[in-house]
Image (cartoon, helix red, strand yellow):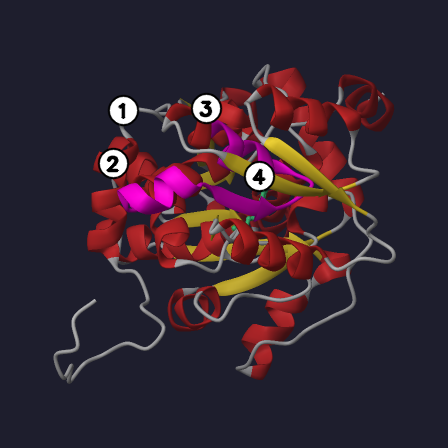
């Protein structure tokens, strides 16, 4: 950073579409260009043409690999040598661990002692060091910050970071490059990294496309924040959508969402399970409950207002597919 007097200085360093495009070039060598799935049965049910960007088929099993790889690619040689740290019990952990192993960066992941064994094993399998903490008595952020200070590690946040947002935006950039302009786009919403990045891409490539964020009904902090015009914090929600159970939006993701989103919708856990069933039976892909937020939001909107969907071209981002098979079976069975 230079100290030149900036007239249009943005204290939050908000990313732009140029950052998304630069991220797309950076991640090309490592990330999958995931397929866009369609189903005539789904189209017939919805009464529209539906294009599903299948990020459940992304490396590490979710779109989070995009933001993680973009962020790690931008570190200096010194930062890379020292290593990175992240706190997460879910997809961000696996994404950072995999991106770090590809880029030969040492990674430390702070996870709760009771995190699912498969997720811990996957994170260790990518070569990361897992540091555990007790989620009832210890503060993960404090532990990560302390370790970062002691060992000189760079903290990689799950959503509130310009490089993370830009990386996440590349999924919708690819989708729109492939489909051309869409009438509406549905994107899941947790902390807002995916939605804010998607908005940057959609506003640039398809300015007339309406864009909806979809979050769990039990954790509707995003909708409340949009209505209130400020970041509203809620108690950690109980929902099947564990990947979107974030109790508040980020200081960077919120202003982008507030300025560019059409609206924020909510769906119930039952609607997510219907989505998992649909993806397995019709599109032959495995999804986690959180991964189905956008589809469930689109489905509910189509049911409520079939007229508006008639003949429309609709995009849906499926965000992840990391789910234990027994859990999947128990939910959809
Ligand atoms: C992290 C995650 C989300 C939420 O993404 P944000 O960028 O936090 O809004 C949604 N779905 C899956 C599968 C995730 O891993």
Q: Is residue 314 visible?
A: no
For this view, does 238 lie left or right of residue 26?
A: right
Q: Nearer the viewer, mark 2 or mark 4?
A: 4
Q: Look at mark 4 in the image and give the residue it sits on.
A: 108
Judging from the image, what secondary structure is the residue with disc 4 in? strand
Judging from the image, what secondary structure is the residue with disc 2 in? helix
For this view, does 300 lie left or right of residue 10?
A: right
The residue lying toward the viewer, choosing from 105 and 250, is 105
Q: Is residue 182 above or below residue 42?
A: below
The dot on residue 320 is: none
Residue at 61% from the left image edge and 58% from the top image edge: 146
Q: Are marks 2 and 1 in contact (CB under 8 Å)?
A: yes
- How far separated are the C-alphas under marks 1 and 4? 24 Å
Q: Are marks 3 and 4 in contact (CB under 8 Å)?
A: no
Q: Earlier in the sequence, mark 2 or mark 4?
A: 2
Residue 86's x, y, as percent? 56, 46
- Bounds of the magenta span? 74-98
- How far separated are the C-alphas under marks 2 and 1? 7 Å
- How far separated are the C-alphas under marks 3 and 1? 26 Å
Q: Is residue 212 above or below residue 24?
A: below
Q: Look at mark 1 in the image and give the residue it sits on.
A: 29
Q: Are marks 3 and 1 in contact (CB under 8 Å)?
A: no
Q: Earlier in the sequence, mark 3 or mark 1?
A: 1
Q: Look at mark 3 in the image and give the residue it sits on.
A: 38
The dot on residue 26 is: 2
């Amino acid at each position: 950073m230079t100290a030149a007097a900036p007239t249009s200085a943005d204290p939050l360093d908000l990313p732009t579409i140029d950052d998304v495009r630069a991220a797309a070039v950076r991640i090309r060598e490592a990330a999958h260009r995931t397929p866009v799935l369609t189903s005539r049965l789904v189209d017939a049910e919805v009464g529209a043409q539906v294009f599903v960007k299948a990020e459940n088929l992304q490396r590490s099993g979710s779109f989070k690999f995009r933001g993680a790889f973009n962020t790690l690619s931008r570190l200096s040689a010194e930062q890379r040598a020292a290593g990175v740290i992240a706190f997460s019990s879910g997809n961000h952990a696996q994404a950072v661990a995999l991106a770090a192993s590809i880029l030969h960066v040492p990674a430390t992941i702070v996870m709760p002692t009771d995190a699912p064994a498969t997720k811990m094993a996957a994170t260790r399998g990518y070569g990361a060091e897992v540091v555990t903490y007790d989620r009832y008595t210890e503060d993960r952020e404090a532990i990560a910050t302390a370790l970062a200070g002691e060992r000189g590690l760079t903290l990689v946040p799950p959503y509130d970071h310009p490089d993370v947002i830009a990386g996440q935006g590349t999924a919708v950039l690819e989708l729109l490059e492939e489909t051309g302009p869409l009438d509406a786009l549905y994107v899941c919403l947790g902390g807002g990294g995916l939605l804010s990045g998607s908005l940057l891409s959609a506003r640039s490539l398809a300015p007339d496309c309406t864009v909806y964020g979809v979050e769990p009904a039990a954790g509707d902090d995003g909708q409340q924040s949009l209505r209130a015009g400020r970041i509203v914090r809620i108690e950690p929600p109980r929902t099947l959508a564990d990947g979107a159970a974030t109790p508040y939006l980020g200081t960077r993701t919120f202003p982008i969402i507030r300025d560019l989103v059409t609206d924020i919708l909510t769906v119930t856990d039952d609607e997510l399970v219907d989505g998992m069933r649909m993806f397995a039976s019709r599109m032959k892909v495995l999804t986690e409950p959180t991964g189905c937020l956008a589809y469930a939001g689109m489905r509910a909107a189509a049911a409520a207002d079939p007229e508006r969907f008639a003949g429309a071209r609709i995009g849906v981002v499926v965000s992840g597919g990391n789910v234990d098979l027994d859990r999947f079976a128990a939910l959809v069975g």
